[in-house]
Image (spheres, rainbow, N blue to C red):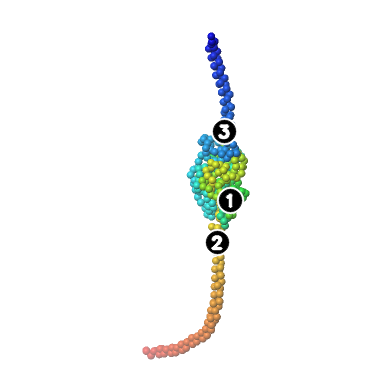
Amino acid sequence: MKKQINPSLKAHLIRGAFYLLLLLAVCAIPFALAQRHATNRSVAPATDPNAVFNPAVAPPSTAADQTQPAVSSGGRGLPPLEIPPYPKAPQVVLYDQYNNASVIATLSATFTDFPAFSADLADDFVVPAGQTWNVQSIAADGVYFPLSGPANSFNVFFYANNAGLPGTQIYSAMNQPFSVVGSTFTVNLPSMAVLTAGTYWVEIQANMTFNPNGAWGWRDRTVQSNQGAAWRNPGGGFGVCPTWTRKTTCIPFAGGPDQVFRLNGTIQGASPTPSPTASPIATHTPTPTPTAIHTPTPTPTAIHTPTETPEPTETPKATETPEPTETPEATKTPGPTETPEPTETPKP
C-alpha cells in the first residue's frame, strides 16, 4: 500500500521552494542591471567621433538639463537669418558668407568652469591677388545654448593657411567687447588685421562661464566655400579632435560644412586702385609741359616788342606840335577891332 505525504508537509515544501526562487530573483536583478549598464557604455567608446554628446538626437529635456557643455546647439534651433547692414564708409564688406544659414550652431567658446571643454572653430577665406585687406571688424551669426548667456567677452584670431587647415596664428584680439543685434554678434578689432594676398582662417570665440550662462555656438552654413571649417578641443573634454580637424569629421551631425560670418574693413590695391590712380592724375603735371610750350609763345611776344619799338619812332608825331600853330587863330585878335561899336555913341 502506497504511503501518502502529509498535506501540511507538502504545503511547507511548496512554500519553501517559492521563497527560494524569490530570493534568487532578488539577487540576480542587480547583476543584470550592472551588466546592461556596462554593455551600453562599451557601445560608444570615447575615441569614436559619434560619442560626442549630440543634443539633436537626445530627448528635449536632456539639453535643458545639461550639466556640461555640448558641441552643438542641436535641436534647439536658431531664428531666421537676419542680414546685418553694410558698414559705413570708408569701410566696405571685405568677405561675406552671410547666407545659406543652417538652424544649428557649433561650439566655439572657452569656459572658466569647464576648461577641458573649451573649443576652437575657424573658417577660411581668400584675399585676392594684388590686394591688401585691413580687417577692422567681424560679424558672426550665433546663439547661446542651452542657457541664455551672456558671454563675458569675445576673442578673434587670424591664422595662416597650413595645407587646408589653420596654421600659425598671425593676429589675436583677446577679451574684446561685443555688440548683439538679433543673432548677429559683432566685434570691432582694437587694431587692424593687415592681410596681404593669400588664404587665411578666422576664428571668433566666446569667453563663457557655463554655469549659469551656458555656451555659445557659431551658426553653421550649409554651403561650402573654399575649405570646410575646422574645429578642435585641445583640452580633451569631448574625447575627439584635440588638434585642428575638419569640423564635419569631428561633429558628423553639424548643420553644414562652413560658418556664417562677414569681414569689414578697407582695401589697398586692386579694385580701389582707381582711386589711387586718380592721384596719379597728378601725372597731369605733364600738362604744365604744355604750359612750358606756351613759354615759347613769349618769344613771339618778343617779336612783337621789336615791332612796337618802331612805335617810338612815332615820336615824330610829336611834330604834330605844329598844331599849336593853330595859334594863328589868335590872329583873330582883330576881333577887338570890333571896338568900333562904341562909335554908336552918335545915336544921341
Residue 300 image position (x, y, % from top left):
54, 77
* Amino acid of disc 2: Thr
- Mark 1 or 2: in front is 1
Spatial CA distance of label 1 from label 2 is: 28 Å
* Amino acid of disc 1: Tyr
Q: Residue at x 53, y 79 (%)?
A: 304
Residue density around tag 3, few if under 14, some if 14–19, many if 20 or more, within 10 Å: few
- Mark 2 or 3: in front is 3
Q: How many marks?
A: 3
Q: Residue at x 60, y 49 (%)?
A: 163
* Amino acid of disc 3: Asn
Identify the mark nearer the N-term, 3 or 1.
3
Rendered image: mark on residue 200: 1
Q: Residue at x 53, y 49 (%)?
A: 225
Helix, strand or loop under label 2: helix
Residue density around tag 1, few if under 14, some if 14–19, many if 20 or more, within 10 Å: many
**Residue occupied by mark 2:** 277
Residue density around tag 2, few if under 14, some if 14–19, many if 20 or more, within 10 Å: few
Identify the mark nearer the N-term, 1 or 2.
1
Which quadrant holds residue 239?
top right
**Residue occupied by mark 3:** 40
Specify whether residue 246 is in view.
yes
Q: Residue at x 48, y 44 (%)?
A: 80
